Image (spheres, rainbow, N blue to C red):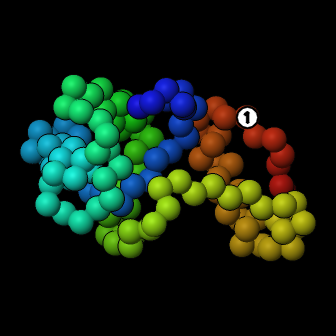
Amino acid sequence: MDGRVDPRDVLIIISRTDFDPHNDEQWKNIWNGYRGRGGFNTPREWAHYDEVREQAFRDATLNLWADGKLHQPRQFGAHPARRQEIWLEAVLPSSELDRNPAARDAWHQFQTVAGLTGVSLDRDYS
């Protein structure tokens, strides 16, 4: 929303929410909640955005939804705990992937998802 990431570069957003951005009532609850006006206990990630930006946020959310880039594990029965981190990114060194089969399997799964979006990856750990 701040222009730091081109929406076309978004691979996936995984959120703790379970809502349909097409549903006006659910959208309003999300918008108000993340702006600190919804009565539920969450950091106010969107507190500095005014009401004028609401439609831009909703449009971006609807586009991510339509593109299959918004994943909500709670829709599938998961109940993830709230993390303190807003952004988390990890890159494992090749040596770790070579000796850690679980990390290598996760990398393969990531490659599959990335491939669905046409993303070109730097290295194939086969």
For residue 44, above or below residue 101? above
Left or right of 39? Residue 101 is right
Which of 34/81 is in front?
34
Element marked by disc 1: loop
Which of 79/102 is in front?
79
The answer to whether residue 75 of the structure is visible from this angle is no
Return the residue at label 1.
120
Q: Residue at horizontal 74%, vertical 57%?
A: 91
- Farthest-out residue, left: 25
Amino acid carrying label 1: it is Ser
Residue 70 place in picture, x, y as percent:
40, 45
Question: Where on the picture, by quarter, is residue 27?
Answer: top left
Residue 12 place in picture, x, y as percent:
50, 45
Give the quadrant of the C terminus: bottom right
Left or right of 45? Residue 98 is right
Give the quadrant of the N terminus: top left
The answer to whether residue 44 of the structure is visible from this angle is yes
Q: Residue at horizontal 65%, vertical 40%?
A: 115
Q: Residue at horizontal 67%, vertical 34%?
A: 119
Q: Residue at horizontal 84%, vertical 69%?
A: 96
Question: Where on the picture, by quarter, is residue 67?
Answer: top left
For residue 115, above or below residue 34? above
For residue 57, above or below residue 33? above
Residue 66 place in picture, x, y as percent:
35, 33
Q: Residues within 10 Å of mark 1 (few under 14, many from 20)?
A: few
Which of 94/52 is in front?
52
Residue 78 place in picture, x, y as percent:
36, 70
